[in-house]
Amino acid sequence: MRSRRQPIAACRQFLTESVVLSLMGGALGVLTAWGGLRLLVAAAPAWLSLVHQITIDGRILALSMMVSILSGLAFGLLPALHVSSTDLIGALRWSARTEGSGGGHRRPQNALIVAQVALTLVLLVGAGLLTKSFWRLQHADLGFQPRAVLSFLSRLPATKYFRQVGVQNGFAQLEVSPVPAMLFERVFDRLQRVPGVVCAAGTSVPPVVGVSLWAPFTIEGRPIAGDTGTADSFVENYSLITPKFFETLRIPIIRGREFTSQDRTDALPVAVINQAVAHRYWPGEDPIGKRLTVGIVTGEAPREIVGVVGDTPVSRWQLKPAPALYVPQQQESSRYRVPYGQSRVQMTFVLRINQPLDVVVPAIRRAVADIDTGLPVSQVQMVDEYLARQVDVPRDSMLIVGAFGAIAWLLATLGIYGTVAYGVVQRTHEIGVRMALGAQRAEVLRMVLRQGAILTVIGTIIGVTGATALTRYLQSLLFRLTPLDPATFIGVTVLFATVAMLASYLPARRATKVDPLIALRCE
């Protein structure tokens, strides 16, 4: 009767210890998550509203506790069942005969450590790729300086200033009132005198918003294919702008000049192109003085190119410069067509400021109201802030995967350390015998390190293989980076292996300090 109760008592002890440890770990994890969430919310900028709405849900807490209990039962039941089915006397005799030479009883533990190392490496490689991609995205050249630039949108009702006059090639032809262009020009002039505004300008297409306006054009003296120009004569970013646009955004002027207040309706039609257009259509030539005709509507007058400016991307994710064509907003034809018409009744103003927003914004609203009280001032924001919002997805992905990777790294390091340290304790007698027979401390150090090295190498091989297969799913989140970036794979693997070997070295060094006499006397 007594022999039956002993295994039951052992099983109860194993399960109790395992569940208690799991609950303590779960409670510590929830506490850490709560503290980490508070730090994240406190550190997040005010415009990142989604982060400030994150809270710890009661259902998540319940799930965490349930997972802790189930984990404790699962990992406590296995050794309990093993103990209950084992001949304890025989096991003690086997242990005395084979201590240090076996290790089969540690195979499940070693297998878990290998799996942990492999999964950790997959997470770390993913985090490394996302971090490197995010760094490149943040440091990509935008072609202008967004810091200290404020923008706002002013839009007029299209129905008030458009009149349809016909249909051509399936598109509604519009007669555009000159009033919007005149109002926007007066607002532009008034904004120059607002206190705290260094310079200001307007554009029909805001910079780097991920939206572009395509426009066909023909080049004077070159063959024409159809009614829209040469086979590839399209610009991806067609913008109506005011003077001082390039000065305000600090887009470099490579050749020629930017627009001035003299570029009005009664003046020579002019245009400014970016380097992408110059390199594509005038390679090795100076495009200043060349003439082109925009083909949005028929009957457009040729425009003389008066300037070449630096490239700016349409989107943060754009890998190649987009061809861009800029024209003075006052020189646009009174005829236009759908869908280009909206660019004639809206203007995004950009202002480089040197005063706080609470000083500048009220003054801007008053300045616009001075021109026309019906002109709206909406979407007021700092340019660098809306640029930051464009990288929310890669930033969040990097932080999430990085956090999980860091936690997994810590757990894997502790797992390797615990496994090697436990092995040292089990082999204390063996180490004492070896040292009593003349084994050097360096030999003992290598012997113990070998255990951690084998686990690390096997887990690393599996982890690199898994990462190679899984990181391709990150392709859509990577910027100018391949999912199999060699530098990331090598760097993460070497760094992880170094930390893992350090975790093995600490108990291995302790093993070299074992006193042979004490070890033999304890045995």
Image (spheres, rainbow, N blue to C red):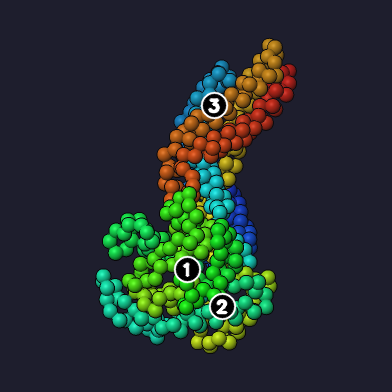
Q: Position of residue 41 (x, y in %)?
A: 60, 62
Q: Position of residue 362 (x, y in %)?
A: 62, 81
Q: Position of residue 496 (x, y in %)?
A: 58, 36
Q: Residue at x 65, y 71 (%)?
A: 198
Which residue is disc 1 drawn over?
Answer: 270
Q: Are marks 1 and 3 in contact (CB under 8 Å)?
A: no
Quote the CA–CA distance across marks 2 and 3.
70 Å
N-term-proximal mark, 1 vs 3: 1
Mark 3 closeness class: few <14, some 14–19, many ≥20 residues within 10 Å: few
Q: Residue at x 58, y 87 (%)?
A: 370
Mark 1 closeness class: few <14, some 14–19, many ≥20 residues within 10 Å: many
Amino acid carrying label 1: it is Val
Amino acid carrying label 2: it is Phe
Which residue is disc 2 drawn over?
Answer: 188
N-term-proximal mark, 1 vs 2: 2
Name the side, left or right, on which 117 lies relative to 522: left
> In the rendered image, which quarter contains the C terminus?
top right
Q: In terms of secondary structure, where does tag 2 sit?
A: helix
With respect to residue 370, does 170 lie above or below?
above
Which residue is disc 3 drawn over?
Answer: 454
Q: Relative to the observer, which residue lies in front, 59 or 356?
A: 356
Q: Residue at x 64, y 32 (%)?
A: 502
Quote the CA–CA distance across marks 1 and 3.
71 Å
Quote the CA–CA distance across marks 1 and 2.
19 Å
Name the side, left or right, on which 120 lies relative to 472: right
